[in-house]
Amino acid sequence: MEANKLKKLVESTCKLNVLYVEDNEDVMSSTLDILNTFFTNIDTAMNGEEGLEKFKEKADFYDLIISDINMPKMNGLDMISEIKKINREILVVITTAHNDYSYLIKSIEMKVDRYLMKPLNINQIIDILGDISKIINDKKMLAQLLEKEHQEALKAKEEEIIQKFTNVYITPTAIFQNGRLIHCSDSFADLFDDRDKNSLFNISIDDYTIFIKLNGYMSSFEDYDSENHENNKVSISKKVGKRIYRVYKKSIDFNDSNADIYIFVNITNEEYLKMKIESYATSLEKMVIKNQKSKIDKDITTDILIEKKNDLISAKDFVKKINQEYIKEIEELNDLDSDIAYAMESFEKDDSSKLIEISYLLKKYSNVIHLFREFEDLYIAIHILSELFISIDFSKIDTNKHSAFFTYLKNIRDGLSQWRKSIFIEQSCDNIHFLDKSLISTSLQLEVLISESEENIEIDESDLDFF
């Protein structure tokens, strides 16, 4: 900054009385070294409670509050809320290391003037103080306009301040009032490659042309679901690919009227990863089940498989209709559950030879499951897994995978035990297939984890038509 400009800035700030609130002594000391260059009168406080008490003692004295957010006893935003009840026109600068949309919303509601992002530096402070000086002049102009009853000019100036404030955040932000877009940040305008920012102010809350129409996504701002936030996602077309944002809404008091502020958080990578996993799991499950059915049991007919899909019955009805001789086989599974648990306990204590015993026990378990045609897919998954355990050398498996291996195996053991109890003993489940998908999926994940050919598995990107 040129010397004469810095001199003018100091001239405009030196007469201001400042209350500086910060709980970190080191941060306060280093910041005061800078602030003393610009201000003659600076009072300090170590927390929001102390800051509020000092302000109450001489509320008419202070021109500017500079405060941290996270502090003991009372945080900065709560302190400012109480101070604003005393003097709603006091200038406020918030310092924080957080870039959280909830802070932004609450700050806008309290009409905080500026944000300083930690760690603070001289250039940042100089820029903010330059803005503060301008705001002071603007407020003087606003006071003159009020005296002349130019209410419309006052409203325009307040809106300009809000517009500048929203642009401090990199998070896209849009404010609607009476169903029309009245403010948006530059980052919000940047979401739309083919639109001029000025043209965005023609957007209404029920405009169905700005977002891509997809099931489970918002088609307009009017679709915002205050009950189920999982539905509040939008897809926006970009020159390169598409972007997905989760939308947060908050009602605020703006210009003495209600307004809604919408914050956009980029979740593109999160959604893309979710779709990749779902597509991969679905494709893998179909592939394995389809390819292995003929290997394990060639006597299964299409008619039986079709009939099996319709066997969505309760445990009580299912047990009534099965061959009662099979119940004896089910009762023996109680001992198998215990044997598997003991074998796994030894296996997890570095006795890798126990994996062969676990394989044998799982095969016995699968043979009992095979008695019931309704559980053919489950039988196949457990049977394949038992054979895989025989063929692998656990000592050669990457040690980084051991934790996941034991977790998957425990889930299968617990799932099989719950399958037996909830269907044949307690008969408590309304749908005998309620655990099938989970057990099959876990078995497949374990198979992929230890498969020597897992690096060769690829997902066809055409399956992901989203991108």
Image (cartoon, rainbow, N blue to C red):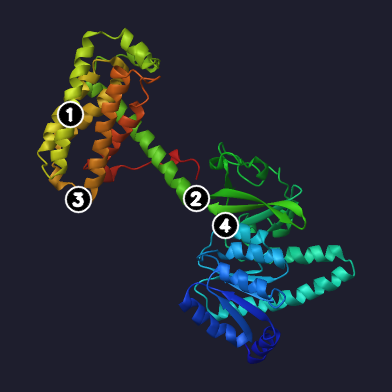
Q: Name the residue beneath numbered marker 1.
A: 338
Q: Quadrant of residue 355?
A: top left
Residue 39 shows in this picture: no
Q: Name the residue beneath numbered marker 4.
A: 101
Q: Amino acid at mark 2?
A: Thr
Q: Amino acid at mark 1?
A: Ser
The earlier-in-sequence mark between 4 and 2 is 4
Using the numbered discs, state the Cα–Cα distance from disc 1 to disc 4 in whole angstroms.
Answer: 51 Å
Comparing 255 with 375, the one in front is 255
- Give SS at disc 3: helix
Q: Amino acid at mark 3?
A: Thr
The earlier-in-sequence mark between 2 and 3 is 2
Q: Name the residue beneath numbered marker 3.
A: 399
Asked whether disc 1 touches disc 2, contact meaning CB atoms under 8 Å apart, the reply is no
Looking at the image, residue 6 lies above or below residue 246: below
Q: Nearer the viewer, mark 3 or mark 4?
A: 4
Position of residue 304 measured from the top left corner of the image (x, y, whole percent): 33, 13
